[in-house]
Amino acid sequence: MFLAASASLALLAGACSSDADSSSPATSTPSASASASTGATAASTCPTAEPDAAATPDWTLDGDTGSIAVVGSTDTAAPSVTVEAPFSVAETQVETLAEGDGPVVAADAEVSVCYMGVNGRNGETFDSSFDRGAPVEFPLDGVVAGFQKAIAGQTVGSTVAVAATAADGYPSGQPQAGIEPGDSLIFAISILSAS
């Protein structure tokens, strides 16, 4: 189990970290164990069940091209992101799908989240802690700007979605994740804890 968690954290660092200097290794690694947190205690799993096929989207957005429909995660089901591809946005947009009742997340907090990342160009999921069934922890100031914009300022316990521009994702692409230069990204995120 520990090796699987370590592999997931390595994937997150590669898929969600800033690409400002992709030639040097990460200087810090998120903790694989639960840390003391403010507000809600981090869950030990992410729901893996498919959402109800008849669920009404919590957020729909027409992009500059294409559109998205997002059904947020619940205690028992993973989120769903439906993309009319190619989807792109000229400005990053954040939507709170369900507001939590925990403390506000600081921009430099270490967070524990369950998340799904979808490429707007083709609608394919490029990374998902929901698929792995396990949340990940990381410092918010170590991820791409769009992911940080989605979480900072939200409250612990919230479920959010973001449609991020390529500039707030990977302007130069991220080949390991199938992300090309110019791809807009969509994240569906459940904020479990922050410290």
Image (cartoon, rainbow, N blue to C red):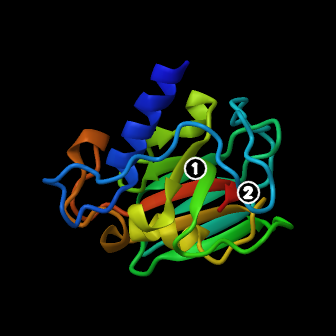
- Discs 2, 1 touching: Cβ within 8 Å: yes
Q: Residue at x 47, y 49 (%)?
A: 118
Query: Considering only vertical position in the picture, is 112 above or below 65?
Result: above
Query: Considering only vertical position in the picture, is 123 above or below 91?
Result: above
The Cα atoms of the two marked residues, 2 and 1, are separated by 9 Å
Q: Quadrant of residue 6?
A: top left
Query: Considering only vertical position in the picture, is 127 above or below 63?
Result: above
Amino acid type at image mark 1? Thr
Q: Residue at x 82, y 65 (%)?
A: 100
Residue 177 position, x and y percent, is 31, 42
Query: Considering only vertical position in the picture, is 135 above or below 194?
Result: above
Residue 49 position, x and y percent, is 73, 29
Residue 10 position, x and y percent, is 37, 38
Residue 175 position, x and y percent, is 21, 45
Amino acid type at image mark 2? Pro
Locate residue 144 relative to residue 116 in the image: left or right.
left
Q: Earlier in the sequence, mark 2 or mark 1?
A: 2
Q: Residue furthest front?
A: 36
Count of numbered tags: 2
Say which quadrant the C terminus sits in.
Answer: bottom right
Say which quadrant the N terminus sits in.
Answer: top right
Q: Residue at x 36, y 52 (%)?
A: 28
Locate residue 24 relative to residue 192 in the image: left or right.
left
Q: Mark 2 falls on what kind of element?
A: loop
Q: Residue furthest top?
A: 1
Mark number for residue 82? 1
Locate residue 102 relative to residue 50 in the image: left or right.
right
Q: Nearer the viewer, residue 56 or 117?
A: 117
Q: Residue at x 18, y 62 (%)?
A: 21
**Residue holding disc 2:** 57
Instruction: Report crowding for label 1: few under 14, some 14 to 19, many 20 or more residues within 10 A (C-alpha).
Output: some
Q: Mark 1 falls on what kind of element?
A: strand
